[in-house]
Amino acid sequence: MAKALKVLKDYIAKVAWDTDNLRPRGLFELSEYMRHNKGINFDYHHNEDGSYTAVSTNFRYGSIITQGKDIPELEKNIRDAILTSFEIPSVYKKEAQIVKVGEQQKEYALA
């Protein structure tokens, strides 16, 4: 229920931003961060309960930590955690264009 409310709130915020032809400042900040620092690398850890945890290794403003029950969910949560780190509502994930660029490196960058 709480997740549904967050998604609804994010969509309402997006509609408000789009009508003013504005975007969240975080999109610009994310773009600038990636331009200057390339991507954000993550280490994956397999937990005892079968879930996975990802911890950033080179994020300049601290650490980004997230988890998922399997690798696809973990990768989705990593993208969401990056957006959250830059205060970007999740409804802007298409505009942010965060993609995984390396299978071995587990690096996420802009498309």
Image (cartoon, rainbow, N blue to C red):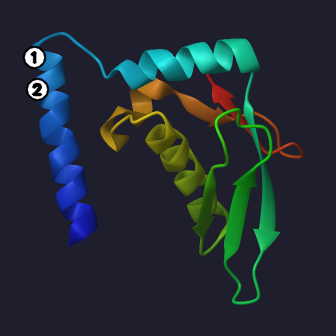
Q: Eyeballing the image, is 77 above or below 92?
A: below
Identify residue type, mark 2: Ala
In the rendered structure, the answer to whether residue 55 lies left or right of residue 6 reads: right
Query: In the figure, residue 59 lies in which quadrant?
Result: top right
Query: In the figure, residue 11 lies in which quadrant?
Result: top left
Q: Eyeballing the image, is 99 above or below 76?
A: above
| Image quadrant in which the C terminus is located | top right
State the CA–CA distance, disc 1 to disc 2. Answer: 5 Å
Tell me which residue sits at (60%, 75%) in the image: 69
Mark linked to residue 104: none
Q: Which residue is mark 2?
A: 16
| Image quadrant in which the N terminus is located | bottom left
Instruction: Compare residues 101 and 31 and report the one nearer the observer.
Output: 31
In the rendered structure, the answer to whether residue 86 lies left or right of residue 78 reads: left
Tell me which residue sits at (47%, 39%) in the image: 83
Residue sticking out furthest to the front: 62
Q: How many marks?
A: 2
Query: In the figure, residue 10 lies in which quadrant?
Result: top left
Identify residue type, mark 1: Thr
Q: Which residue is mark 1?
A: 19
Q: Eyeballing the image, is 5 above or below 94?
A: below
Tell me which residue sits at (64%, 71%) in the image: 70
